[in-house]
Amino acid sequence: MILSLYIVIFVAVILVLSSIRVINQYEKGVVFTLGKFTGIRNPGLNFVVPIVQRILVVDMRVRTIDIEKQQIMTKDNVPVDVNGVVFFKVQKVDDAVIKVQDYEYAIAQYAQTALRDVVGGMTLDTILVERQQIGNEIRKIVDKETEQWGLDVQVIKLQDIEVPDDLKRIMSRQAAAEREKRAVVIKSEGDRDAAKNLSAAATIMAKSKGAMQLRTLQTLDGLGPTASNTVIMALPVEVMEFFQKLTRKE
């Protein structure tokens, strides 16, 4: 009799312990009673009926999954290898459990297909420049489909875009040619501006008496007192002015 009582107590304790489920703050539980959905449990201490009820706990935090690298033919027939990453979270825990078997695998496959469709409709130049735009377009496509699964796709980012090696060399030469072209244009514009400034300065000095002599003295002063600097002047400035006056009188 006592042994039977101990067995009953032991079984009761086991049943009580097995009915206790602790759900963390970042989780929610989906309860099934005899295989049928009967409710959602919030974080904290929860009790379920052993054998009759089953609870599935789902993480509600933001998750990341990789979009596997795949080779895609662009609109201008260039093969590129592209991969990315998806940031999402479970919005409706019951839909995520009931409507799709494995929502992580499902969203990864759908994102991979959407990536192929979007990149395949763009040229290589657009793909290399508009990464953010591509990610936004893929997110819209994936979010529209996965919304009915209780998922919220927040961001999709492209990680790597790899082009063939021979195309990389061509692009490198093209970039070098563009930089050289810009350098030549900038230098020519600088020479043009300098010529305009010199012409204006010469006109002003020709109109101002003594301006040319003052500029000559400034140039001599700029040479500095270094012994290695030797300046030879054929005629003094006063002599040059004298001859200019004689020429004018004649």
Image (cartoon, helix red, strand yellow):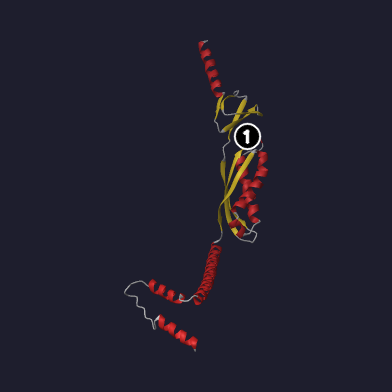
The image position of residue 234, as x and y in percent, is: 39, 83
Q: Of all residues shown, which one is farthest toward the bottom?
A: 250
Determine crowd level at label 1: few under 14, some 14-19, many 20+ residues with C-alpha closer than 10 A. Answer: many
75 left or right, relative to 245: right
Disc 1 marks a residue whose amino acid type is: Val
Quadrant of the rendered image containing residue 174 = bottom right
Q: Position of residue 9 (x, y in %)?
A: 53, 16
The residue sitting at the top extreme is 1
Q: Using the image, determine if residue 162 lies above or below residue 188.
A: above
Residue at image position (57%, 33%) is 27
Q: Identify whether 239 is placed above or below 139.
A: below
Image quadrant assignment for residue 30:
top right
Where is residue 52 drawn, in percent x and y?
A: 62, 24
Q: Which residue is mark 1?
A: 93
* 214 lies above or below 61: below
Q: Say which of 204 and 25 sits in front.
A: 204
Asked whether, in this view, residue 229 is left or right of residue 160, the answer is left
Circle 1: element type: helix
Figure check: 60 above or below 223? above
Who is closer to the viewer here, 36 or 194?
Answer: 194
- Kindly give the residue lying farthest to the front in the view shown: 249
Give residue 33's position: percent from left, percent from top.
65, 26
In the visual, does 245 lie left or right of 64? left
Looking at the image, which is closer to me, 21 or 182? 182
Total marks placed: 1
